[in-house]
Every structure is written in C-alpha cells, then in structure tokens.
Amino acid sequence: MDSQRKTRKLNGTVIVTYRCNARCSMCNRYKAPSRPEEEISIETIRKLPQMYFTNITGGEPFIREDLPEIVRELYRKSDRIVISTNGFFTDRIVALAKEFPQIGIRISIEGLEQTNNEIRGLENGYERGYQTLRKLREMGMKDVGFGMTVQDKNAPDLVPLYDISDEMGMEFATASLHNSFYFVEAKNIIHDRPMVAGHFEALINKLLKSKSPKKWFRAYFNHGLINYIYGQPRLLPCDMSFDTFFIDPYGDVMPCNGTKDKEVMGNLNRQSWEELWNSPEADQVRAKVRKCDRQCWMIGSVSPAMHKYIWKPGWWVFSHKVKSLFSKKPYSMYENKICRAYRDGLVTKEQLDRCSTCDLSAVVSDGLSEASREQLKTRTGEEIVEADIVRQMSR
Ligand code: SF4
C-alpha cells in the first residue's frame, strides 16, 4: 500500500443530488433524478478526506435545501470550493455567497440569450444566470464565472460570451460534449469539427494575448478541447482515482464522471474513507483507469493533470507566448496534425466519428439506485422534480 495515499490531500467532486430543473439538450440527467431521502448525508460528508480542491455539483446542487450545511462541513476540509450551478435559485446562491464569500461559483451559460435558453430549456435561464453573476460580483465575490459546454449550436457564441465575462472581470470555463452514465447520454457528438475548432482557435488567440498567466493555461486547455473533439488521445495522462475522486448522491466513490457505466471504488455510507480508498475494489478501478480509452477532456480530470505534468502545458504556453511577440495570431488549429489531415482529405468524417464516444446503439446507464429508478415507473423525472420544487417554493 502506498503510504503517501494516506496523507496526500485529494481533489474531490461531490455530486450532492441527481435532481435537476434544467432541460439541457446534451444531458438527460433531469430525466433520472435521485430520491432526496437517499442523497448523501452530512454524516457521510464528514467522512471525506482533506482536499486541496472540492467541486460541488449535481444535478442542480441548490435544489438541496441543506446545501449551506453541506458547504459548512466541506469548508472545514477543503482549501478551495467551487460550486457548479445553473443559476436558477438566485436567492439561495446569494445567501450562500454572503456566508462564504471566498468560495467559487460557476454558472452554466450555454451562449447568448436565445441559444442558451434553447440549449438549457430553462425559461429566462440566461437572464437569471447573468443577473445572479452580476449580483455576486457587486457583492465583491471574486471567484465567479461562466461555464459553457461548446457544441455545434453555440460555438459561434463562444468568443462573444468570453468577451462579456472578461468585461465583467469573471472566470470563463469551457467544456465540450461528453457521453457517460453521469450525463445519461451516449449520442453526443460534434458534427462540424472545423467550424467548432475555428471558434476555439479564436478564443485561444484572445487568451494568449491577455496579460494573465491563468488565461494562457486556459488557452492550453482549449487547445486540448480541439484535440478531443477530433477524437485524439488526451494530451496529458488521466490519473483519476489516484489523487482525485467523485462521490455520487448514494455515497458511491468513483474515479470520475466520464465512464460509460458507473465504476465504484467503495461506498462511504458503509465504509470508512481509509478502508474504501485502500481497498482491492479501489485498486481494480485504478487498473481500469490505466487502460481507459475514453480520452475525456473535462476540467475535473485535466486540471490535476496540468498541475502534475506542468512542463508540458508550460512549454506550450512559453512557445506560444514567444510566437505572440511576432504574430497577431500565435495559435492555429492546424498545429494539430489531425486538423490538417481532415482538411487535406486524409481522414473522413466517418473515421473521426468512430473515434468519439458517441454510440447510437448503446444501452445508456444512469447510475441510479433501485429505489430512485422505481419512482420513475409511475412518474417522469421532470414531473418528480417539478413537484418537488413547487413544494419547496410554497413553504
Ligand atoms: S479518460 Fe479518465 S476521466 Fe475519462 S472516463 Fe477514462 S478515467 Fe474517466
């Protein structure tokens, strides 16, 4: 057993609920909610280890009325906390921000107003998200920003949305389409790769021209997204489950949220952290991660890798900053061999499609417990969550 495993601070993501009130076109989680009675308890959260970074996510985490209690508990064991939200519950977000002005908030906004509302299926979603962010900024909160999942439909909004976040002095986190049990989805795919990559290229050049080293490394992350949407091997190794973990609403500890089916290292409701983390089951999952071919490029698995293998993004940033001294456009998507090969007709769209995780005939997993699945026999996930929110709001 690696004695270091016992003492090292970890990077953890806590999925506090699978309930969600949005209707995103690239995620079916809203159809497969968890039952509130089964969702991770404070007692289980208390058993988590010390973390240098904690992401709180869902579903929509602010659906949980006891989220402040959860944050209070996690605050004791985390150097930094970031909550990912759709921004709908403005009052709850603002109240939490008052208590914890140091935490980070990322609100998912999928483009300018019309595109966002179409993709996320939340009435007034853009306006609510934008106003929540403005309010948080006015309160003096520093670590706030947008999170955008780039796809064919919203790629043209990528740079305009970045410009808005930049003017507001906010963070701008990007992602692209993934398939997994977590998203309850296997059909996500980018269709017009050169078009989407072209918008990433424009963003990368903007980020490289900024004065912020953080943004230069974001440029590298976005360069990796171009590589990902062309279905190529990750630019950096994936070490999920070694110093990084996810925990789901049922207390199951998993390596990540990118696998096709849920992979379980152990259950924190029933086990202690030490027992779970050092178990043979956890090692079996680690062995699978070493052979994993899904090539995800999500910030949760890339950020720890960028810190660990810093020389690689560091060299990329250095060489492109040097180029920026001589050129207005220091980055070109055609630096990627695969982009040139596709442009020059050496690879077909069908071949690239086969490199993606999109599988039209896959049986999609949802990672739900038996009891959560049982409730879907009489009502849809949307009906269950809607009734839940109406009940919460009428109190
Ligand atoms: S590449 Fe990494 S993050 Fe993606 S599914 Fe495999 S182990 Fe998980």
Image (spheres, grey):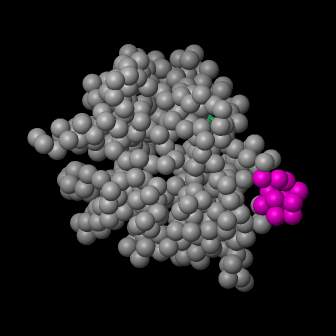
State the quadrant of the N terminus.
top right
Q: Residue furthest left?
A: 395
Side of 185 where 42 appears, left or right? left
Q: Tell me the residue at 62%/68% (across/down).
A: 199
Judging depth in this view, the residue of 24 and 332 nearest the camera is 24
Answer with the quarter of the image where residue 55 lies: top left
> Is residue 235 among what the camera can see?
no
Answer with the quarter of the image where residue 78 lies: top left
Q: Tell me the residue at 52%/68% (across/down).
A: 157
Task: From the top left corner, tell me how far across and down residue 276 is, in percent.
Answer: 47, 20
* Residue 267 to residue 105: above or below: above
Residue 191 lies in magenta, yes or no? no
Side of 282 where 253 appears, left or right? left
Task: From the top left corner, tell me how far across and down residue 141 is, in percent.
Answer: 29, 63
Judging depth in this view, the residue of 176 and 272 nearest the camera is 176
State the quadrant of the C terminus.
top left
Question: How many marks overall?
Answer: 0
Side of 53 where 74 appears, left or right? left
> Is residue 118 among what the camera can see?
yes
Q: Tell me the residue at 53%/17% (across/down).
A: 279
Residue 345 lies in magenta, yes or no? yes
Please provide the residue range marked out in magenta.
337-349
* Quarter of the displayed picture in which ligand 1 can be seen: top right
* Residue 282 to residue 293: above or below: above
Q: Tell me the residue at 77%/66% (across/down).
A: 334
Task: From the top left corner, tell me how far across and down residue 220 is, in percent.
Answer: 63, 61
Q: Residue furthest front?
A: 378
Task: From the top left corner, tell me how far across and down residue 381 is, in percent.
Answer: 37, 34
